[in-house]
Image (tube, coloured by chain):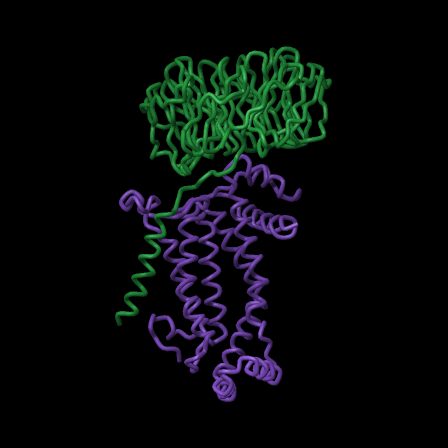
Amino acid sequence: MNTKRLVLISLLVLGSLILSACSGNRTVSNNWHGLAADAEHAYVASGTHIYAVNMDNGDEAWRFPQEADSKLMFYANPVLTADGQLLIGSAGSSHPFYSLNPANGKENWVEPFTGAMGAWLASPLIVNDTIYAPNTDGYVYVLDLEGKQAADPIQIGGALWAAPVTDGKFIYVASLDHHLHIIDPSDGSVVDTIDLGGAVPGTPAVAENGVYVGSFASTVEFIQSNGNHEVVAKTENWIWGSPVLAGETLYYADLTGKVFSFNTTEGSQNWEIALPDAVVAGLLVSGNQIYVATEAGNLIALDLDGNTVWEKPVGGKLYTAPVLSGETILVAPYQAETTLVAYDVDGKQVWPFTPEK
Amino acid sequence: MWDTIIINPMTNLLLWIYDVLGHGPHMFGLAIILFTILIKAVTWPLNASQVKGAQAMQELNNDKEWQEIQKKYAKDREKLAQEQMRIYKEKGINPFASCLPTLIQFPIIIGLYQSITRALSITPFDMLKLARTIYPFQNVENIIPLNSTFLWMDLGRPEGIFQSIFHPSFLPNGFPLLALIVALTTYVQSKLTMPTSSNPNDQSAQMSNMMSIYMPLLLGWFALNFASGIAIYFITSNLLGIIQYAATGRANWSNLLPGSKNK
């Protein structure tokens, strides 16, 4: 082989190796915002940053990280713990899981999670002193409140987009693998797996003796902790957002824009209304009103009989479920000029928040 | 418009194949391979026309009369262009015959790339877009989300193997086997289809030579940085291209070794 051939072949191999330095993991570069709030701040996970916004005036309190890092993306709803931590994982090409101080955005601890292969799109669940963090790699990671691994990861299967919930005894994990998985937290075993016939992107609603789950099978199922389950309602299209249980009434919406009220005691539908636009976001029920965020960018307040009380055009697209802080309703429009808008219960805008560049 | 005409039909076809295959592990990789074969079959006449056009141009470059005209009017570009057009007319050569099919295939390749990435939607927003893409006849509840496992790969991630034993900081995904295969098959295909020329001033042959080096690097880079499903497409497409060209009996296997002179 002459020198020229050798050089060319070497260049070919070396070129591939060198260029691979630019390669990344399965990155998530676009998604709607995550949102949470306490009395002091609203926390919006908006891609490269998490912003804390003062509830009293809509000003930015802090942002994390200070400088954008292309490997970090945040889209999950942040979670506040009882001991004063704000938890969120990155959905970027690297997957650290952070505990922040909600008062100032400083890092309490970070778990690098080199083992987690996927993005953090779901919020974690905190049970006593244990964090159950679902990842899109199909595992629920178990940490203590200092970020140390508390138990082996629990293999679920399918991407996990929904926050787990607990009835106090079991943990329920909805997966895109079409199943609801029931976990016994005492030993981390999966005690039951229920086929729901379609992917489940939304968090189940916890009832007294089980959970209600909406799915891409266009059904709402009631699943008991012993694994017994039944379809209690059918819809015309996928149910994306989490159903909400308020007293004995379950509220949910589908992609055609229909909003439903379901009496869980009698097992019958109270009412349904058809909105002109798709509803992807979960509903917010507070006081005597139901707040519906539509894909077309409208925030609609309904009374408990399904009548429209007020409707406000927010702009952009609303995929994130509205969140309540005191008597203020927060919505995080996607692909809009503003990142967060606050309304009072009468539909009057309190403040908008747009992060400075 | 682009979505309606290109992306949506392609995505639905890809999902339909995946569903027919049983939508289990490894099936999306197989669906991409079958989809590529189907696209290649549909565009076979275009490829054949391209090969024929390139061959005609090559024969012209080796034509003694044309070489003499090139020498004679080397310093008179305008006259040379006029003579070139005359010869094209006399010999019935369409100068666009070799590049037009490529241009037509370009949107197909782009569309295919977008269809694969859309089908492998990894965020809720991507999934919502996919939901709006799927035609009503599809068995949508059953097939979503797609199982993106294929052999040792996650088709939604850049490929790499031996990650546990081979993980230098500049190779976070492990050894990039698929990228190397993409580069190799692209190299083989471009060399086999490279026109043979006895004319030392033949610019198209020089250009082909350059392309046979840059294209493998470029596609290899794509395979390194993008979802491995795209690399599966590149490899399948390259292998089919090699088979197609070999079937014409014009493959120049001696071109494969770097530095070998065109015969």
Q: Colour of chain B?
A: purple
* Residue B183 in the figure: left or right of residue A214: left
Residue A57 lies, in percent from the top left, at 54, 17
Closest to the observer, B71 or A158? B71
Residue A355: in sight, yes or no? Answer: yes
* Residue A127 in the figure: left or right of residue B58: left
* Residue B99 in the figure: left or right of residue A152: right
Residue occupying the point 53% across, 59% down:
B37
Numbered circles on residues, count: 0
Closest to the observer, A55 or B113? A55
Closest to the observer, A293 or A325? A325
Location of the C terminus of chain B by quadrant is: bottom left
> Height in image: B76 above or below A246?
below
Residue A137: in sight, yes or no? Answer: no
The quadrant in which residue B52 appears is bottom right
> Height in image: A315 above or below B8?
above
Residue occupying the point 59% across, 32% down:
A337
Residue occupying the point 56% across, 33% down:
A198
> Height in image: B228 above or below A337?
below
Residue B134 lies, in percent from the top left, at 62, 43
Chain in green colour: A
> Height in image: B141 above or below B244?
above
Residue B247 lies, in percent from the top left, at 49, 72
